[in-house]
Amino acid sequence: MNDIINHRKHIDKIDSRIISLLGERMMHVRAIGEIKNKLNTQVTDSKRWESLIKDRISKGIQNNLSPKLITDLWDSIHRFSQTIEKKV
């Protein structure tokens, strides 16, 4: 049982780091949204998205993560990022 508790403690620490990093990421998303708003450019950059998702899937595979997990996760992050960019 101690092994489970120790693993859960590590997971909790990792989750805290992930949340912190997502917060930092969204701060940059807001800044990009402000720039795009000033330049009057579209929120979605299809070429960037295609390149980004391929890169993230590749990095995920290198870390023994399924492409579906990476795709689902980044789709969610991307949709939320677009929402933030549109609101700025």
Image (tube, helix red, strand yellow):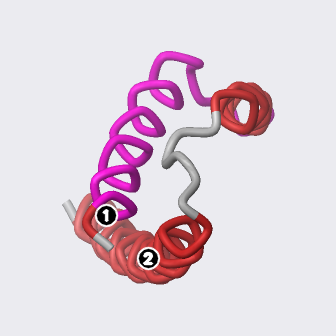
**Of 82 and 77, the residue lying toward us:** 82
Q: Amino acid at mark 1?
A: Ile
Circle 1 packing at 10 Å, graded few (<14), some (14-19), many (20+), is: some
Residue at the spot 54% in from the left edge and 60% down from the top edge: 40
Task: Give the label on residue 2, or none.
Answer: none
> Relative to 67, is 51 on the left or the right?
right
Observer-nearest of 11 and 72: 72
Distance in Å between CA atoms under marks 1 and 2: 6 Å
In the picture shown, does residue 39 fall above or below 52? below
Residue 88: percent from left, percent from top: 33, 74
The three-letter amino acid code for the residue at tag 2 is: Arg
The rendered magenta stretch, by its main secondary structure, is classed as: helix
Residue 20: quarter of image: bottom left
Looking at the rendering, in which quadrant would you find the N terminus? bottom left
Which element is circle 1 on? Answer: helix
Number of numbered discs visible in the structure rendering: 2
Residue 84's tag is 1
Crowd tier of the residue under label 2, counting other residues whose Cα lies within 10 Å: few below 14, some 14–19, many 20 or above: some
- Residue 68 vs 71, above or below: the answer is above
Q: Residue 21 lies in magenta, yes or no? A: no
Mark 2 — residue? 30
Q: Position of residue 52 (x, y in %)?
A: 72, 38
Residue 21, x across and y down, in percent: 49, 77
Residue 6 place in picture, x, y as percent: 33, 72
Of the image marks 1 and 2, the number of the one nearer the N terminus: 2
Question: Is residue 9 shown left or right of residue 69?
Answer: left
Does residue 88 appear left or right of residue 30 in this picture?
left
Label pair 1/2, CB-CB below 8 angstroms: yes
Q: Which residues are magenta?
A: 62-86
